[in-house]
């Protein structure tokens, strides 16, 4: 491995000693803060000081006084205020002195001027892909120093459709079924008007667009006032309408240009140039106080930089005694067999196959190869390594089973009703034969995924079978028709998911000696509403529970309730969950218990308090908590300039991407964890992947961030959905998969939500 050379997309904001800031102080009131921000935008910065219950106001020009009681403060003691002033100062300078187009203020998004439209000249000028520079400030508690403000910079690509829908109709762009927006002014006049989505077009009536799934007050909108949502497929529809047969080539060219912009070396160069440009400007934070920007954070400088650690792969255990271990899951399974192979039952499986009549032959061949293996599908090993044979042993031998009896039931058509009829035939056959199906293969078409749940054959089939305790594994025609080696890879991953679904334990994490009972709990949520603007929005909390060695215990869900009732329902769900585990594992009230929560949304204080109340009600005396917010949308980018990438065909992928398992510890409460490195990227055009930000909540009583980061990484190496590395810890991934399944299942007439309260709810049915 070449030497690592880490760079963070951040530069410290500095100021000379004895600098003083003149501020006005007002008592905090939400309405007052909102009103003053609207009235004084661009002239006075107003910042809430929640710790002291007040509003701090700083005049940005010398011709105005800040409201409130005047005083002077040391900026070093107020890094949050300095961070806000820096963001405002950069906005003001770029808008007033440089003429940049400002797209947003929080975070600051600026349209790059030197980098023009990525579309080539043959595209219409109103269709644009533009580089947008994003500037955000963060207060980072740097090790050995007081918390200090940092300015972060990154670049993204923004789509623009500059003509209204009235013109698009003239060009022949299809609008039916697509969402449209109207322009809406920002309260800050320096900010460009933003697009607000108002509904989906169902009809064009003269100059009017009739909408469904629409915002209040927008059953119709004038086509001249509406703009097409700038999604990728809508951009492509515009190009195809205008250029016809030339569209495919142009879209490929644009994709290649955009991929170049995403490359890690290009993003790093643009970030450094942008922060360097700001450093050279004469920008005032406030009258008489200059913005001084330090150098970009680089590990090699010897200045402050996050502590870096490269985590090793966790040890996976393949038998209860812990003798059989490996760090590579697929190799471990093929060498040792699954963790529970001695105890797993049944060894003889009953498998139902549901497929379309016209695809019965190729589906049957797929199932046979899945069960028996594809020993001839191999790729030569490199550098003295053995050949790669993804599915040589087949499902039966890989997991220590005896055999399988397969029966096929054909759907007479491609609709949901035809699939439902085939399912009922399978159920009748089981009743008549006096047996139960262990799982069902369902052949589907890829375009089924575009259908709503009520018309989707896969979800209808899953609803019918799952509520009767039969696990379901779909396989698309595209997968069935893959070439030999890719097919073997796909079968290998499917075999792992199927074994886990039917109750098998492929492997566990090696657990370290620990005196505490420890549960790792994923808290996700699923929003129930019709469309984007549907009424009756409800939130369903999803709880997944694991032991410290990664054994999946159960899944629980709250009732569907309005969001303001979610904390109460969460408390009830957790009480059920922890009580069940406590009783099964015979916890005593005096035992030490540690509960680690992984949450994929900002964790509110009321949720932490609900959890604390739940545990107090259970009578557990020695409980510690860790609340980890797993953040995927944040401003940090970590580069490794020593990594030149991995060859991918004729190009290189993952240039400047840190390797999987890289940790950058920002402070005692935040760490960046890389779960997608160059090797894990599928395509070169994906650029440099973002790390996850792990944020430890202030109410956590267990605060060993290094331990918790290592644990999150281990859980990202422990997915039973596929052998490939997971981009998320399974605490979060499994909750997401459950939410996706519930979204499709809830609209099918056959679905019974109460089925999840049966033993089926404790299986990995969602994999």
Image (cartoon, rainbow, N blue to C red):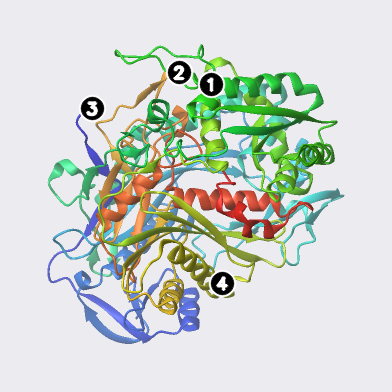
The reply to whether callout 1 and callout 3 are in contact (CB within 8 Å) is no
Residue identified by numbered label 3: 1
Q: Is residue 87 above or below residue 114?
A: below
- Counting labels gives 4
Q: Is residue 172 visible?
A: yes
How far apart, in angstroms, are the residues tagged by discs 1 and 4?
A: 44 Å
Determine whether the residue tagged by mark 1 lies in a helix, strand or loop: helix
The reply to whether callout 1 and callout 2 are in contact (CB within 8 Å) is yes
> Which labelled disc corresponds to residue 389?
2
How far apart, in angstroms, are the residues tagged by discs 4 and 3?
A: 50 Å
Specify which label sits upstream in the sequence, 4 or 3: 3
Image coords of residue 659 (percent x, y): 31, 35
Q: Dot 3, how many residues are within 10 Å of its Cα: few (below 14), some (14-19), or many (20+)?
A: few
Specify which label sits upstream in the sequence, 1 or 3: 3
Q: Is residue 282 visible?
A: no
> Which labelled disc corresponds to residue 569?
4
Name, please, the residue furthest toward the front.
434
Q: Quadrant of residue 582?
A: bottom left
Image coords of residue 677 (percent x, y): 36, 35
The reply to whether callout 4 and callout 3 are in contact (CB within 8 Å) is no
Determine whether the residue tagged by mark 4 lies in a helix, strand or loop: helix
Specify which label sits upstream in the sequence, 4 or 2: 2
How far apart, in angstroms, are the residues tagged by discs 1 and 3?
A: 30 Å
């Amino acid at each position: 491995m070449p030497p690592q050379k880490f760079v963070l997309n951040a530069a410290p904001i500095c100021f000379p000693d004895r600098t003083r800031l003149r501020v006005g102080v007002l008592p905090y009131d939400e309405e007052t803060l909102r009103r003053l921000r609207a009235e004084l935008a661009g002239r006075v910065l107003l910042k809430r000081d929640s710790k002291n219950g007040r509003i701090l106001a700083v005049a940005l020009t010398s011709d105005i006084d800040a409201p409130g009681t005047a005083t002077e403060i040391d900026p070093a003691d107020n890094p949050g205020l300095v961070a806000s002033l820096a963001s405002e100062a950069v906005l003001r300078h770029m808008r007033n002195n440089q003429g940049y187009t400002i797209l947003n203020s929080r975070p600051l998004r600026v349209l790059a001027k030197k980098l023009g439209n990525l579309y080539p000249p043959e595209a219409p000028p109103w269709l644009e892909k533009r580089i947008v520079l994003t500037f955000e400030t963060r207060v980072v508690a740097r090790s050995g120093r007081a918390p200090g403000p940092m300015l972060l910079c990154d670049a993204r690509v923004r789509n623009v459709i500059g003509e209204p829908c009235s013109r698009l109709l003239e060009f022949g762009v299809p609008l039916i079924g697509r969402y449209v927006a109207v322009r809406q002014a920002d309260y800050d006049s320096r900010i460009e008007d933003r697009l607000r989505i108002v509904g989906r077009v169902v009809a064009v009536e003269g100059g009017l667009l009739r909408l469904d799934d629409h915002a209040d007050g927008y059953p119709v909108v004038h086509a001249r006032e509406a703009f097409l949502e700038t999604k990728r497929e809508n951009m492509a529809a515009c190009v195809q309408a205008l250029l016809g047969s030339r569209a495919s080539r142009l879209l490929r060219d644009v994709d290649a240009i955009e991929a170049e912009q995403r490359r890690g070396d290009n993003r790093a160069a643009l970030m450094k140039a942008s922060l360097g440009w700001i450093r050279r400007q004469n920008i005032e934070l406030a009258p008489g106080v200059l913005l001084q920007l330090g150098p970009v954070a680089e590990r090699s400088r010897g200045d402050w930089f996050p502590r870096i650690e490269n985590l090793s792969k966790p040890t996976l255990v393949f038998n209860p005694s812990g003798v059989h271990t490996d760090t590579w899951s697929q190799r471990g399974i093929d060498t040792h067999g699954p963790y529970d192979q001695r105890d797993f039952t049944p060894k003889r499986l009953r498998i139902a196959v549901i497929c379309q009549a016209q695809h019965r032959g190729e589906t049957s061949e797929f199932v046979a190869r899945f069960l028996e293996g594809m020993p001839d599908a191999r790729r030569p090993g490199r550098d003295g390594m053995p050949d790669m044979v993804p599915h040589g042993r087949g499902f039966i031998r890989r997991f220590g089973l005896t055999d399988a009896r397969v029966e096929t039931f054909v759907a007479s058509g491609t609709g949901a009703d035809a699939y439902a009829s085939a399912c009922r035939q399978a159920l009748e056959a089981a009743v008549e034969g006096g047996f139960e199906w262990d799982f069902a293969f369902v052949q589907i078409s890829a375009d089924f995924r575009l259908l709503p749940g009520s018309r989707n054959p896969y979800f209808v089939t899953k609803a019918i079978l799952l509520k009767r305790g039969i696990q379901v594994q779909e396989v698309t025609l595209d997968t069935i028709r893959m070439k030999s080696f890719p097919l073997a890879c796909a079968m290998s991953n499917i075999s792992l998911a199927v074994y886990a679904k039917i109750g098998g334990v492929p492997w566990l994490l090696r657990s370290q000696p620990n005196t505490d009972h420890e549960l790792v709990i994923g808290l996700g949520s699923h929003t129930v509403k019709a469309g984007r603007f549907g009424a009756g929005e409800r939130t369903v909390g999803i709880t997944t529970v694991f032991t410290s060695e990664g054994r999946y215990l159960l899944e629980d869900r709250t009732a569907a309730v309005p969001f303001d009732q979610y904390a109460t329902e969460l408390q009830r769900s957790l009480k059920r969950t922890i009580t069940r585990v406590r009783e099964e594992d015979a916890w005593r009230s005096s035992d030490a218990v540690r509960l680690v929560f992984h949450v994929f949304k900002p964790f509110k204080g009321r949720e932490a308090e609900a959890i604390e109340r739940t545990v107090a009600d259970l009578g557990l005396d020695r409980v510690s908590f860790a609340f980890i917010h797993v953040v995927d949308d944040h401003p940090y980018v970590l580069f490794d300039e020593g990594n030149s990438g991995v060859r991918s065909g004729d190009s290189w992928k993952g240039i400047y991407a840190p390797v999987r398992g890289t940790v950058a510890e920002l402070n005692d409460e935040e760490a960046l964890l890389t779960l997608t490195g160059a090797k894990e990227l599928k395509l070169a055009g994906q650029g440099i992947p973002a790390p996850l930000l792990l944020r430890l909540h202030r109410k956590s009583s267990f605060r060993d961030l290094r331990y918790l980061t290592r644990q999150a990484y281990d859980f990202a190496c422990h997915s039973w959905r596929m052998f490939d590395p997971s981009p998320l810890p399974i605490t979060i991934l499994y909750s997401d998969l459950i939410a996706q399944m519930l979204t499709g299942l809830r609209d099918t007439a056959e679905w019974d939500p109460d089925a999840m309260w049966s033993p089926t709810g404790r299986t990995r049915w969602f994999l």
